[in-house]
Image (tube, rainbow, N blue to C red):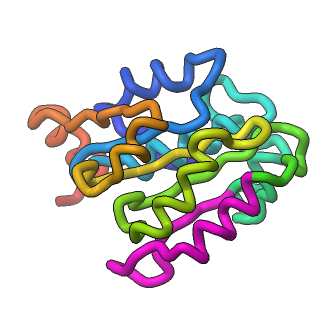
Amino acid sequence: MAEAYPWQDNLWQQLAGRKQHAHAYLLHGPAGIGKRALAERLMASLLCQRPTPDACGECKSCLLLKAGSHPDNYILEPEEADKAIKVDQVRDLVSFVVQTAQLGGRKVVLIEPVESMNINAANALLKSLEEPSGDTVLLLVSHQTSRLLPTIKSRCVQQACPLPGEAMSLQWLAQALPDC
């Protein structure tokens, strides 16, 4: 289960409390504020067979996700650090999106950082963003939305991720690193 950061509590309640989910979310903000953890937490909840609103951690879906072998989960990131996401990687993703969910629920895709897609990869993603098949949710994580095509941004529910305040940061650090 991904870590839950206290500065994301309000946003988490808003996202997890929805009855209907958008087909694509663009989670954006500065690097290092926990966007990936939030996306992984939402992904686990969306795939869970008994979310409360967090993933239960015990159902078949949660166990498969923990093991890294969930058939309805797809993570797309650059093959090498600081490199581009290539068009062939996005084509593989598109093939995944058009398939039926193997566990009978929804499929969830996580792309991070979405701005690392080259222009051909970004264009290849547009059709899936516009009309994902079945019950598919795409979670796009961006550190620099200014580098995204306007057509990518317009097809997603854009969600700014909150920054922690100084007091909350210090409190969290004191709990996370008690011996320092």
Residue 83 visible, this orientation: yes
Q: Residue at x 35, y 60 (%)?
A: 115
- The reply, left or right, for residue 164 in relation to residue 59 is left
Occupied quadrant, residue 4 = top left
Residue 177 visible, this orientation: no
Instruction: Judge whether residue 80 is colored magenta.
Output: yes
Q: Residue at x 45, y 31 (%)?
A: 157
Quarter holding the C terminus is bottom left
Occupied quadrant, residue 27 = top left
Measured as percent of width and height from the top left, residue 16 is found at 55, 24
Measured as percent of width and height from the top left, residue 74 is found at 66, 59
Occupied quadrant, residue 91 = bottom right
Up-down: is 105 above or below 92?
A: above
Q: Residue at x 64, y 36 (%)?
A: 45
* Residue 69 vs residue 132, the one in the foreground: 132
Measured as percent of width and height from the top left, residue 117 is found at 42, 67
Residue located farthest toward the left when viewing the structure as drawn: 166
Chain part drawn in magenta:
74-97
Measured as percent of width and height from the top left, residue 81 is found at 38, 80
Count of all numbered marks drawn on residues in the image: 0
